Image: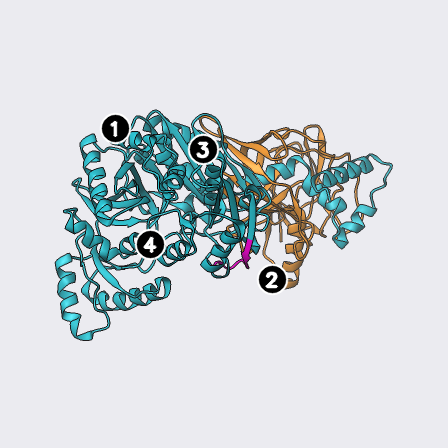
Amino acid sequence: MSAPFRRVLVANRGEIAVRIIRACHEDGMEAVAIYSDADASARHVRMADVAVRVGPASPTESYLRGDLIIAAALDTGAEAVHPGYGFLAERASFARAVEDAGLVFVGPPPAVIDALGDKLNARRTAREVGVAVVPGTLEPVPVDRPDDVAWILAEAETIGYPLLVKAAAGGGGRGMRRVTSAADLPAALVGGSREAASAFGGGSIYLEREVVPARHIEVQLLGDDAGRVVAIGERDCSIQRRHQKLVEEAPAPGLTDAARRELLDLAVRVATAAGLRNAATAEFLRALDGSFYFLEVNTRLQVEHGVTELVSGLDIVREQLSLAAGRPLTPEALEAAARAAEPASHAIEVRITAEDPARDFSPAPGRVRRWVMPAGPGVRVDSAVEPGERIPPEYDNLVAKIMVHAADREAAIGRLRRALDETEIAGIQTTLPFHRFVARDPSFAAGELSTGWVGERWDGLSAQAEATRVAQLAAGLDALDTGLAIAAEIVGPGPRLAVQASTIPSDSSDGRWASAGRQAATDRRPR
Amino acid sequence: MTADQTTGIVDPRAVRVVAIDHGGLPSGGPIVLEPAAVLVAPAPRIAGTGALGGIAVPYPPLESAPSGTYGPVLVDGGPLDIQLERHDEIHAVLVERGGGDAVRTPVLTLPLERITGPSLGAVRREVVVDGWSIEVEVESERRASLRERARRGREETAHRGSTEVRAIIPGQVITVSVVPGDAVVAGQQLLVVEAMKMQNELRAPRDGEVSSVAVGTGQTIEVGDLLLVLQ
């Protein structure tokens, strides 16, 4: 079949821009990249057929400038705009503007983005089609009316503590507050509302029970213009920190085929009711008793779509482009959906981000000095990073997604361990130590996953302290072996040492040592 | 506690390694490594008792000597059976023996960077262990301790306690050059120890008076043995 478009603008950066450009090129489509000043020499820019500068490094002046991006698409003759994830991917106003400009938005229709982007609306939609939602309010909490405090407290009592205050327009844990007692509720409501207003432009918040321990399991969905919605499989994303995913796998470990069938059906019901087109992901919590609670729908390509691609054999980005052109779900997609409840292999993804896993995963930007990614059977790496590259502090700090694929989960974990052992990154601190730990952890191997896993299992400071000791010993031994101390005394510029060096006659045996030491020093520090 | 405080001599090959945090400040304590065995030069000496007094001239060069040539090393004064197996400029494996099986930890050692400023003469390097990117500063222990001694000297010339001089090498005492009650100056020879058929002079770490001598000529000493006490 012919390519759905001749030319596609990729309104993103980093690994996801590279991923989308690859899909375009494989199907004979040209790709237009956009870039900020921080990304002028980035990989996605070089890979694209055309690249357009949109502005300075700051996202609000570049990757979030919908008007400039649409102008770039029109200028370069692109027919469609793929937003990737993040940035403008879930902004209905951007999708609408793309369509108004006569272009195709690769994603769900603006009305669906709007409807599902409002988490409260999504909860009501799920409820209407008989899908259980996490217990909580279905209407916004009236934070601006002090006389309703009694009502709010009564609602909170019904839901039970600890509970979460969430932003209706939220995502990624922003605007979220955990409340353990009634006394803390008013402050959390005010704070959460303010944060939601500044982050999302809407201060509407709601209450939800905190389901712990729980697993985070989500379903990959595709829908076509004829209204047909299918599930391609589920992913377990329980290993998170600050509500951000670190490890994702497909299928979810320990689910029976019946439970999986039930979950996929719940997701399809919600998405069908919402009128889903193109690609989206429905997120659920699974409580200890096995019951699923609907959380929300993300109306975009997920970061972790790759694990579903590996298990299903379907190229989700390719499918997105085909669906965006108005074509029906492809036979490959329908076959993948038919097989979804009985997955025949296992895939795991780890997110390598520029973060310090010893310090609560705080961002650690910097310049990459060494960058060796794993390869070999069953390994896929999605990344846009190259040695020498600076990881800009302005953007998401995901630097690579390392995925492994094998016949079953045990083999996949073995392959992950092997792949991570091959990985070499220097110059920046990443989550690699954490992932190596995960790949060797017996509770992970046993499938004992929960959203509290990181806090319960990971002791980053101790792991780092042990590594520091080894680093000190290794550097010290290397210095002994190369005579660093002696070389430093001979060539070192310290005033005392200069005197000492001058006392060594150059033709004596001492002089030989001196010259050898000097040579060693020069070899070690070629400048 | 640096080597010169406890032993009176600092092996010129000894190095001090400090981990540096992202702000460029030391994180955690330093580790001092020195060869346990001694390679003593056939006695070229620097005369005098000034700033350089007693500093032996450099030891023979270590022409790309493979790690482990010197056997166990002393880490913070205690012997540790560790070895660095170098595969290339970047790749190496730290081998730690002790007890059961050897523990082998792959490490990446990035190229050295020279430091300017207060730690002039030291080098900084990034070492990656198990995915942890760790910045370390490596400096000649003698330089570091000289600097510290100078500072200490300025700070506490008034009140000095006693200094125990201990062996950092195993061997046999060949000569004891002082007796209790002798006044010595920094750098003055105290005794000579033979190890691996080479003689090693042990010199006074500072001015003072010898209050006791714990060893005699011909005696075999082990690492850490008390040799004498300076008052």
Check if mark 2 and mark 1 are on a common chain: no
Q: CA distance from mark 2 to mark 1?
A: 80 Å
Q: CA distance from mark 1 to mark 3?
A: 23 Å
Residue B76 is tagged as: none
Q: CA distance from mark 4 to mark 1?
A: 33 Å
As helix, strand or loop, the secondary structure at mark 2 comes to loop
As helix, strand or loop, the secondary structure at mark 4 comes to helix
Task: Specify the quadrant that holds the C terminus of chain A.
Answer: top right
Quadrant assignment, res B43: top right
Residue type at the position of mark 4: Pro
Chain in cyan, by letter, is A
A128 or B36, nearer to the observer: A128
> Are there few (<14), some (14-19), or many (20+) residues within 10 Å of tag 2?
few
Give the percent coordinates (x, y) of residue A408: 32, 26
Magenta residues (range): A53-59
Q: Colour of chain B?
A: orange
Q: Which residue is mark 1?
A: A342
Q: CA distance from mark 4 to mark 2?
A: 80 Å
